[in-house]
Image (cartoon, grey):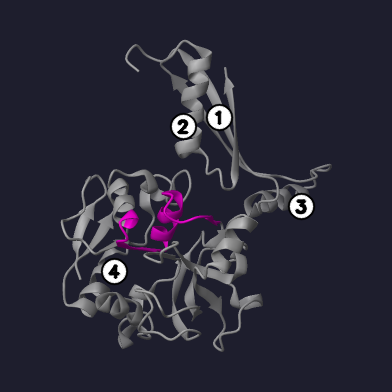
């Protein structure tokens, strides 16, 4: 990246369905105890806002997929979603 | 036995690992910085010590698992070399692709620091020859993310291949219920690689090598390694 960021993206990493999420459960319990009604369930995840030095969306997608597979997500238990903003 | 203890930013049990290895083998291990690309020539055993590498940022062990030295550690393991990951070291082995599965947050969300009984599942390995199969040992645990999880297929493979090294149990060796401190699948406290040259475990045998601090049940692991 030598001419500054050209594209922005957001990567969202969430736990796969069926993986126990004790933090989400604790947050869910806290919301319910605050009387915030209609909360069914809560799953906690992570958001990464990433600036990229590329102009091509397809290239950005490839770079981010590599980043997710190599580091941002542990695909044993997590899913990831890439959005080019 | 020539040992190397890898130091990551945030490791904090390297001193204990060094002391345990030296007490058992008579040789002081080398300390290897994570940014190195090579292990010292002739290294037999690599230890990834406990701690909070990179402040547990992203996921426990995730960043350390991709550190420069880890390529050398993976090559060492592929050659059949011994690699021991304790606590954060176990998390690093899982994140670094040397062992399957992942260490998730403890089921009750608490950081657990206490003495814990373990059952030695097999004694025919480089790490456990000083124990007997089924022996109950008492060592320390200190972790927030020790809940071992893997998909059903992986768990079935680990069990089928006899790769569970230690299970959490009570003083009589019974597993399950309150004897499992963190919700770990099948009470798993430690697992071996396919060839049993890599061991990852959450408990701290290196802290139980001196009667002064409450027991010497952890010393057997280092005696086994010294004899390997």
Residue B8 visible, this orientation:
no
Residue B7: image location, x then y, percent = 27, 55
Callouts 3 and 4 close, C-beta under 8 Å: no
State left or right for residue B217 relative to residue A75.
Answer: left
Q: Is B7 covered by the magenta stretch?
A: no
* Rendered image: mark on residue A67: 2
For the record, the magenta segment spans B77-104
3D distance between C-alphas at marks 4 and 1: 38 Å
Q: Residue at x 34, y 51 (%)?
A: B74
Q: Residue at x 32, y 48 (%)?
A: B70
3D distance between C-alphas at marks 3 and 2: 38 Å
- Relative to B29, residue B118 above or below: below
Q: Residue at x 20, y 61 (%)?
A: B43
Q: Nearer the viewer, mark 1 or mark 2?
A: 2
Quarter of the image that includes the N terminus of chain B:
bottom left
Residue designated by label 4? B17
Residue A40 vs residue A68, the one in the foreground? A68
Evaluate whether label 4 is on the same chain as label 1. no
Quarter of the image that includes the C terminus of chain B:
bottom left
Evaluate whether label 3 is on the same chain as label 2. yes
State left or right for residue B108 relative to residue B24.
Answer: right
Evaluate whether label 2 is on the same chain as label 4. no
- Crowd class of label 3 (few under 14; some 14 to 19; many from 20; radius 10 Å): few
Callouts 1 and 2 close, C-beta under 8 Å: yes
Q: Nearer the viewer, mark 1 or mark 3?
A: 1
Residue B55 visible, this orientation:
yes
Residue B159 vs residue A6, the one in the foreground? B159
Residue B223: image location, x then y, percent = 29, 80
* Rendered image: mark on residue A33: 3
Q: Nearer the viewer, mark 2 or mark 4?
A: 2
């Amino acid at each position: 990246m030598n001419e500054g960021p050209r594209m922005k993206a957001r990567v969202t990493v969430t736990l796969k369905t069926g993986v126990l999420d004790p933090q989400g459960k604790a947050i869910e319990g806290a919301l319910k105890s605050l009387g915030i009604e209609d909360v069914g369930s809560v799953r906690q995840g992570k958001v990464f806002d990433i600036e990229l030095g590329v102009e091509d969306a397809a290239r950005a997608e490839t770079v981010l997929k590599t980043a997710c597979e190599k580091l941002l997500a542990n695909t044993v238990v997590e899913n990831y979603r890439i959005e080019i903003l | 036995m020539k040992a190397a203890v890898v130091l990551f930013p945030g490791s904090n049990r390297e001193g204990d690992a060094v002391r345990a290895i030296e007490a058992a083998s008579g040789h002081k291990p080398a300390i290897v910085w994570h940014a190195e690309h090579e292990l010292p020539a002739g290294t037999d055993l690599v230890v990834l010590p406990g701690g909070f590498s990179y402040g547990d940022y992203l996921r426990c062990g995730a960043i350390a698992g991709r550190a420069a030295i880890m390529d050398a550690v993976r090559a060492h393991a592929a050659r059949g070399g011994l690699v021991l990951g304790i606590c954060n070291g176990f998390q690093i082995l899982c994140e670094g692709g040397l062992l399957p599965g992942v260490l998730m947050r403890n089921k009750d969300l608490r950081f657990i620091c206490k003495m814990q009984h373990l059952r030695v599942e097999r004694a025919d390995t480089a790490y456990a020859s000083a124990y007997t199969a089924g022996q109950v040992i008492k060592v320390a645990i200190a972790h927030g993310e020790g809940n071992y999880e893997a998909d059903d297929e992986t768990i079935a493979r680990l069990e089928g291949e006899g790769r569970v090294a230690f299970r959490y149990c009570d003083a009589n060796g019974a597993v399950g219920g309150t004897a499992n401190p963190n919700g770990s699948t099948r009470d798993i406290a430690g697992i071996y690689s396919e060839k049993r040259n890599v061991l990852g475990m959450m408990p701290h045998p290196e802290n139980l090598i001196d009667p002064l601090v409450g027991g010497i049940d952890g010393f057997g692991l280092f005696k086994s390694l010294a004899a390997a």
